[in-house]
Image (tube, rainbow, N blue to C red):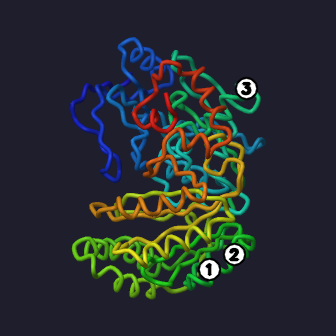
Amino acid sequence: MSDTTRTDSAWRNWAGNVTARPARAVTPSSVEELAETVRAAAADGLRVKAVGTGHSFTAVAATDGVHVRPDLLTGIRHIDREAGTVTVEAGTPLKRLNLALAREGLSLTNMGDIMEQTVAGATSTGTHGTGRDSASLAAQITALELVTADGRILSCSAKENPDVFSAARLGLGSLGVITAVTFAVEPVFFLTAREEPMAFDRVTAEFDALVAENEHFEFYWFPHTGNCNTKRNNRSLGPAAPPGRVAGWIEDEFMSNGLFQLVCSLGRAVPRTVPAIAKVSSRALSARTYTDIPYKVYTSPRRVRFVEMEYAVPREAAVQALREVKAMVERSPLRISFPVEVRTAPADDIPLSTASGRESAYIAVHMYKGTPFRGYFTAVERIMTAHGGRPHWGKMHTRDAEYLRAAYPRFDEFTAVRDRLDPDRLFGNDYLRRVLGD
């Protein structure tokens, strides 16, 4: 039995910047119940949106209709060791998936830096990590199952409904409600992480070489300083050598969460202190090297709440775009307490992927929750769009369908699939109207 709740209470996303008041919230316990929920909503003239853990900063999952909450659609359906795949229920949090795979001696090839999202929410909005050769979570999908607007349960892969599969790997929830995802996996392996402070000028001068020489390279620039922190993850033979318990707590919990929370709070209350704090905190970082299984290296706890905007630009434009952001901050009255994150991805073949058809670099900017962000984000967005940037679908931006159609060569291919699967926009909302058009 599904749990259906008529609700007048507001739903809020993780960052607290998006709210919605659905007419009812439904927690189906099976795919068949979900299909019936979709049919009933259509009969009642209500729109349907699935919502995961609310880690998107956009209103991609907001609705005034029926909120489908996949809390009971969790767990691994099937592991095919011969094919190297795992099929998992759509509501499974990435953390649970990673733990379950590790127990089976398996791992995803690449992943983002947090693992709180559901698998469907993460893939549908384009969650990614950094990688020279390995791409986003959506690019690791080999098959999926979704409930369509007419209540059908549709299986999709490169061989079965291939046009839907191509689009739905990253579909923004606009093609149906995903109920299961099949990922390519591999035997668990070790990664050695090398974290090292580096000057901004050196990182940008050596960026291409650092990307070429490492399987996974990323760095963080601290605004108001010339300082960065770099991270290189590469496969190794092991054995596991995680950070010591005390050292790991100091770096990952105290400095990255507890102390950072205090620093951000002070910066919000007294903005003039931000540049001085940034100089001190960016110099406090020290080099460290550790080895562990993938999810323990790729991911980190993130307890400080913030809002975020991220753009994918062509890889060759990354350094110039970042230098323009740095120059803009230096000549402005802005006070930015959060570091700017830079990652990379190879080109992929997903129509709405931010790396679709081009090798990409991601530049992400953040502001502490409750701090005015519009001036900063607007200025950064102006720089990114001048370089042909594509906004992350789950992070804040102001782009619309006209801009995005020009930015994505396969945009019309996607909307044609949407027109066929959901002509009445049962799965639509205001955000999708803006970014995909009517």
Pointer 1 local density, CA inside 10 Å: few below 14, some 14–19, many at least 20: many
| Residue on which disc 2 sits | 210
- Residue depicted at x 45% and y 57%: 309
The mark that comes first in sequence, 1 or 2, is 1
Q: How many marks?
A: 3
- Say which amino acid is labelled 1: Val
| Residue on which disc 3 sits | 160
Are dots 1 and 2 in contact, CB under 8 Å? yes
- Which residue is outermost to the top? 43
Up/down of 73 relative to 305, above or below: above
- Residue depicted at x 46% and y 72%: 328
Percent across and percent down for residue 237 are: 74, 71
Is 63 on the left or on the right of 108, as rendered? left
Up/down of 383 relative to 427, above or below: below
The mark that comes first in sequence, 1 or 3, is 3
- Disc 1 vs disc 2: which is toward the camera? 1
The mark that comes first in sequence, 3 or 2, is 3
Disc on res. 344: none
Q: Tell me the CA gap for discs 1 and 3.
A: 45 Å
Q: Secondary structure at mark 3?
A: loop
Percent across and percent down for residue 21 are: 27, 33
On the rendered image, what quadrant is the N terminus found in?
A: top left
- Disc 1 vs disc 3: which is toward the camera? 1
- Residue depicted at x 41% and y 77%: 331
Percent across and percent down for residue 264 are: 31, 72
- Say which amino acid is labelled 3: Glu
| Residue on which disc 1 sits | 203
Pointer 2 local density, CA inside 10 Å: few below 14, some 14–19, many at least 20: some
Are dots 1 and 3 in contact, CB under 8 Å? no
